């Protein structure tokens, strides 16, 4: 039993479409030594009749709640049950709201959350986890650092006579193929050898593919989604090595289809098996790709490295040539986006391409390939008219320029971010922080003040504003904001 009689440090509440972020948060916190209630490691393994009972008990026994909110969250009856109980058992001050993106319905439905610590997610996971660390006092481990040689490495194989490709940058090929397909790879990370292999084959049952498609179409109803994924995963449990301990079932959305993975321990290793079902765009045949990862350490250590597994699996492409992948890597000029005057039509037609390049930029940034990430994000701006996405992408570009040691360009792009999405305070806050690092509090002050006006509950902004006023000799203002900071820390 933890502090104040609580069994769990935190309960994570989210809609299924945001499961990737919820999983990443959960895994990072577990590795950091926190007791996390996350349904993929909890309720997916209990009897269905006890599904809600397990959630209710998890909330009652959690000290903090992390809620990934947006309008979809506010409209979910199951998220509603969770939020009502989080407010009751954790309390307003211990609910950490991560807005993805900032949308009005959650606060309209739960006005109490105006008193909760909040963070607007901009695509930077580490910045979001820093927010969690500041509000809880926890020490959260940094992401795993992987050495990768310059350039991108792509493995190409064939399934049903058509090429599939995987980005294997950082992995070492052990065997090109083995029984049931191939390849077989290893990566040594921080002293651990992580292995994976791939098997694949044609899925001849239309019902199987329709079941997967049904999962995607039902992703607005989390409970139906849970029921169907458990039904579909049952035969995977039966295929595991006798005596294997299943620890979790995980949902992934790729290419408009629902896929899943199983975490289990086979008595020697922790493993994660992914099942991806893809339809080839030209031959109209369906294949299942099964990745199996093997990790030799403890469960806690395993949670640190599963992000590497998720990232690799999501690079699988079937039906796109290696030449196309190379072109994407080199970021050659894409086809000119739609020039239709109707703004709505442009959003509808071009948004999928914008999302694609945005996700690639985020992945490249995680790998430390900042220049390539910036190029990908510049492409996003050519394809989207959505203010929030443009603001977020420009913000991420600004952070990349900061990390590359170019503060002038960072400030320029941050200003463009604030102009693109006036509701975003983070860019203004970061401009102020850059000026402070340049010992220029006079330039920093108006940006920090505006950021604090937009979000007076942001710990970092308030702390920088105090320092700025102190540097300018405005000690009365510094003390006033010091009172605000003390209230935020309670």
Image: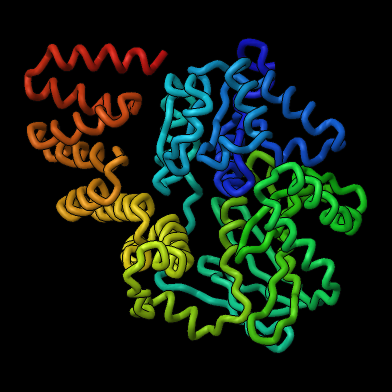
Quadrant holding the C terminus: top left
User: In the rendered view, would you say 259 is above or below 136?
Assistant: below
Q: Residue at x 43, y 57 (%)?
A: 362
Q: Pinpoint residue 191: horizontal percent, then vertical percent.
A: 58, 52
Q: Pinpoint residue 54: horizontal percent, then vertical percent.
A: 77, 28
Whether residue 399 is visible to the viewer of this picture, yes or no, is no
Q: Residue at x 14, y 33 (%)?
A: 446
Q: Pinpoint residue 86: horizontal percent, then vertical percent.
A: 61, 22
Whether residue 365 is visible to the viewer of this picture, yes or no, is yes
Name the quadrant containing residue 3: top right
Q: Residue furthest bottom?
A: 161
User: In the rendered view, would you say 289 is above or below 115?
Assistant: below
Q: Pinpoint residue 242: horizontal percent, then vertical percent.
A: 92, 52
169 displayed left or right of 83:
left
438 displayed left or right of 156:
left
Q: Residue at x 29, y 15 (%)?
A: 484
User: In the rendered view, would you say 157 is above or below 273?
Assistant: below
Name the quadrant containing residue 89: top right
Quadrant holding the N terminus: top right
Between 445 and 350, the one lying in front of the other is: 350
Name the quadrant containing residue 422: top left
């Amino acid at each position: 039993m933890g502090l104040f009689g609580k069994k769990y440090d935190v309960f994570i509440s989210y809609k299924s479409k945001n499961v990737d972020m919820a999983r990443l948060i959960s895994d990072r916190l577990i590795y950091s030594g926190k007791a996390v209630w996350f349904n993929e490691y909890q309720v997916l393994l209990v009897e269905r009749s006890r599904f809600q009972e397990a959630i209710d008990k998890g909330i009652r026994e959690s000290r903090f709640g992390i809620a990934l909110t947006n309008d979809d969250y506010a409209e979910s009856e199951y998220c509603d049950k969770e939020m009502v109980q989080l407010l009751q058992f954790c309390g307003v001050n211990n609910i950490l709201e991560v807005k993805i993106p900032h949308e009005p319905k959650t606060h309209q439905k739960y006005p109490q959350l105006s008193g909760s610590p909040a963070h607007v997610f901009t695509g930077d996971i580490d910045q979001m986890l820093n927010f969690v660390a500041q509000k809880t006092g926890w020490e959260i481990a940094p992401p795993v650092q992987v050495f990768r040689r310059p350039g991108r490495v792509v493995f190409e194989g064939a399934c049903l006579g058509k090429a599939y490709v995987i980005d294997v940058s950082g992995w070492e090929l052990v065997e090109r193929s083995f029984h049931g397909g191939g390849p077989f790879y290893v990566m040594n990370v921080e002293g651990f050898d992580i292995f994976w292999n791939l098997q694949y084959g044609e899925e001849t049952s239309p019902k199987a593919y329709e079941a997967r498609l049904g999962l995607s179409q039902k992703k607005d109803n989390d409970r139906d989604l849970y029921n169907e994924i458990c039904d579909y995963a049952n035969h995977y449990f039966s295929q595991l090595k006798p005596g294997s301990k299943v620890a979790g079932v995980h949902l992934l959305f790729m290419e408009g289809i629902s896929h899943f993975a199983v975490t289990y321990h086979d008595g020697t290793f922790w493993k994660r098996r992914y099942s991806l079902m893809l339809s080839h765009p030209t031959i109209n045949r369906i294949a299942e790709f099964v990745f199996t990862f093997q990790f030799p350490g403890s469960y806690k250590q395993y949670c640190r490295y599963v992000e590497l597994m998720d990232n690799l699996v999501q690079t699988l492409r079937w039906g796109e040539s290696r030449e196309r992948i190379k072109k994407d890597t080199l970021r050659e000029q894409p086809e000119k986006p739609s020039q239709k005057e109707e703004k709505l039509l442009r959003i509808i037609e071009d948004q999928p391409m914008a999302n694609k390049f945005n996700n690639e930029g985020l992945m490249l940034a995680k790998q430390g390939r900042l220049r390539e990430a910036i190029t990908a994000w510049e492409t996003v701006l050519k394809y989207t008219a959505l203010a929030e996405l443009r603001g977020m992408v420009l913000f991420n570009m600004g952070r990349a320029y900061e990390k590359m040691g170019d503060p002038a360009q960072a400030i320029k792009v941050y200003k463009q971010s604030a102009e693109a999405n006036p509701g975003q305070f983070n860019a203004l806050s970061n401009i102020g922080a850059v000026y402070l690092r340049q010992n220029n509090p006079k330039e920093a002050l108006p940006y920090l003040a505006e950021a604090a006006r937009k979000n007076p509950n942001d710990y970092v902004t308030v702390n920088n504003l105090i320092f700025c006023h102190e540097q300018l000799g405005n000690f009365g203002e510094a003390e006033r904001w010091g009172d605000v900071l003390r209230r935020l820390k309670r």
